[in-house]
Amino acid sequence: GAALAHLLISSEESVAEMGCSFASSLISPLLTDPRGSGKALQQCVSPASSEAKDDGLSSYRKAALALVVGEGSGGGQGEVSCLPSLIQIVRSGAEDSWGTKARSLKLQVVAGECLAAIALAV
């Protein structure tokens, strides 16, 4: 939650890369495993039942959702989402009007992959 979000927004490139790599390791199977695709997910849900069959990726989906909604599920004020930090990294392709240093392409790619995995989870 908050600790990961702080790693992601760090001005130190290696720290931000470490945070992105950690987030990616939690959710990357949603992109690399064919069962994580939207079509495969739709096949896991039977029209007659609202319960999804276990395809082995539910823990990765829960991790992706936790990155979006923050720690826990109580909706408390102390919860921090990593989504704004990931979006900021992807959007940092060039220096902005405040002179913020552009992030490396490698970091932007990993953050983009995290966002793609999150999109598949929701």
Image (cartoon, helix red, strand yellow):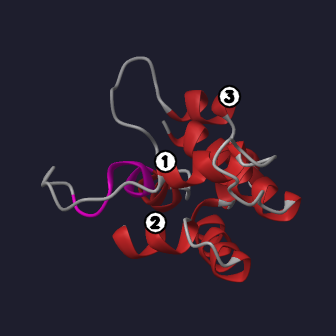
Instruction: Name the side, left or right, on which 102 lies relative to 57.
Output: right
Secondary-structure class at tag 3: helix
- Residue 29 vs 121, above or below: the answer is below
Q: How many marks?
A: 3
Measured from the top left, where is residue 30 in percent x and y? 65, 52
Question: Residue 67 lies in magenta, yes or no?
Answer: yes
* Residue position marked by numbered label 1 in the rendering: 84
Q: Circles 1 and 2: CB distance less than 8 Å?
A: yes
- Three-letter amino acid code at the position of disc 2: Ala
Measured from the top left, where is residue 49 in percent x and y? 34, 25
Question: Residue 7 lies in magenta, yes or no?
Answer: no
> Which mark is first along the chain, 3 or 1?
3
Residue at x 81% of width, y 46% of height? 94
The numbered disc on residue 5 is 2
Snapshot quadrant of residue 48: top left
Q: Can residue 106 be seen here?
A: yes
How much space separates mark 1 and mark 2, taking CA atoms? 8 Å
Residue at x 65% of width, y 31% of height? 38
What segment carries the magenta color?
Answer: 65-72
Residue farthest to the front, as pictured: 98
Residue closer to the observer: 3 or 35: 3
Residue closer to the observer: 30 or 45: 30
Residue closer to the observer: 112 or 34: 112
- Residue 68 vs 56, above or below: the answer is above
Snapshot quadrant of residue 101: bottom right
Mark 3: few/some/many CA within 10 Å (<14, 14-19, 20+)? few
The numbered disc on residue 39 is 3
- Three-letter amino acid code at the position of disc 1: Pro
The numbered disc on residue 105 is none
Residue farthest to the top, as pictured: 47
